[in-house]
Amino acid sequence: MYRAEVLFKGKPAGILEQTVTGGTRFTYNEEWTGDVACCFPATQREHNWANGLHPFFQHLGPEGWLREKQARGAHIKDEQNDFALLLAYGEDCIGAVGIRPLEETDVPKIEEGAPTPGRTLSGVQKKLLVAKEGDRFVPAGKDGPAPFIAKFNSETRGSLVRNELRSLQWAANILGKDEVTQFRTAYVGEEVALIVTRFDRTEKGDKFRLEDFAQVLVKPRGVNYDGKYGSSYEEVARVIREHSARPIIDLDKLFRRLIVFAALANCDAHLKNFSLLEARDGLRLSPVYDVLNTAIYDDLDRNFGLSILGKTRNVEELNGALFRKFGAEIGLQERAVELALSDLKKQIDKNPINVPSGEPPDGFISRFAEVVRNQCLRLFEE
């Protein structure tokens, strides 16, 4: 049976263990007084989950490409074994919580050359933790800071890096640079990558608490990793009201971001793409990350990431009237809603997406710009 220490900013906070009934139990150490997560209030010393690994810990683990590579590198035959993956790679996860195996636990042995040994990160896309050596970005080793995430194109989509670069640039222009994670492109080895600066780490490697909303809401990841879609934007707003140190400000930020995501036809704004980040005054809505114009890919779902006003909606259904109702539903004053719409329209008008001269209508930027233009017409129609 697996047993591990739960670390918070590198310090032992409690014990995570399998139960005889097939679930897991997290128990705070006697001397620990603070919460390690929203779903684990320290006023309750023991937290049980009936089946498998508790969702908070599930969502620390990788998905997709990195999960396959890390499972193979540690000879974990069952890729669904979240606990085994965390025992092998979970000492340094996204955020402040990590997993360190206790001595009596049989820990999977990691092969030399396995990606990010001793570390992991969530997400489906091909990605790695990287560090900077001189002018180069290199895969992070087991020790030392890993202040960047490198995101790559996939074998089936060669424009992912370009797409996210354009999407983040446009979002930063509309929302403001401080509202969006820092990013750039660079090569990691022979591959071009989008390099994202982690906001849960300092340059020296100090950790900040960071929890995505699937963790806060205790949503099981699902066999196909679709648990992050089983929610609504109203539920996202509820998390902000209950846990943000500045809920009115962060609800306004959420409202503006959702309109920008709708304008970009970003249909993948699921629970794991919203997070609470430790700040001086408490937990706050983190900067924007993982933004993609998904509508330019004909084979991808065109439904907005989560339900809104009680329905799953195609991006072409999203308009100003719907967002005005949503703003009222989450408790924003009418003047705040109208100010947000006015501010966003002004910034959009100031930041047109310029198509390179000579690019054909089916070129990447042409299609990107057309999607955004059509979405904005629906959102800001008079």
Image (tube, helix red, strand yellow):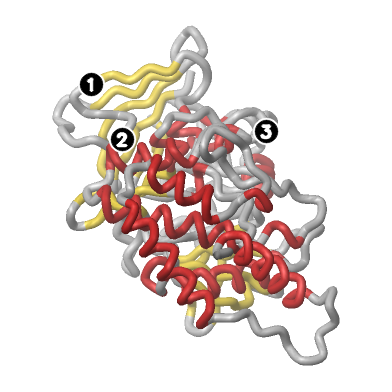
Marks 1,3: beta carbons within 8 A: no
For label 1, the SS is: loop
Disc 2 target residue: 38
Examine the rendered structure and indicate whether residue 99 appears above or below residue 16: below
Q: What element carries label 2?
A: loop
Q: Which of marks 1 and 2 is nearer the N terminus?
A: 2
In this view, 224 is above or below 170 = above
Q: Which amino acid does the dot numbered 2 rest on?
A: Cys
Q: Which residue is rendered at x = 51% and y = 58% of the image? A: 259
Q: Residues within 10 Å of mark 3 (few under 14, many from 20)?
A: few
> In screen coordinates, is 215 left or right of 65?
left
Q: Give the percent coordinates (x, y) of residue 105.
A: 45, 26
Q: Where is residue 103 in the image (x, y as percent from the top left)?
A: 39, 30
* Residue tagged 1: 44
Which mark is drawn over residue 224? Answer: 3
Could you give the CA–CA distance between mark 1 and mark 2, rounded to whole angstroms? 12 Å
In the rendered image, which quarter is residue 222 located in?
top right
Q: Residue 218 carries which label?
A: none
Q: Mark 3: which secondary structure?
A: loop
Q: Is residue 38 left or right of residue 224?
A: left
User: Amino acid under label 1?
Assistant: Gln
Asked whether residue 76 is in view, the answer is yes
Q: Position of residue 260 (x, y in %)?
A: 52, 62
Question: Dot 1, how many residues are within 10 Å of its Cα: few (below 14), some (14-19), or many (20+)?
Answer: few
Residue at (64% x, 62% y) in the render: 375
Instruction: Say which of 350 and 380 sits in front.
Output: 380
Closer to the chain start, of discs 1 and 3, is: 1
Mark nearest the camera among 1 and 2 is 2
- The residue furthest front is 382
Q: Cα distance, mark 2 to mark 3? A: 25 Å
The residue that appears at 35% across and 38% down in the rendered structure is 239
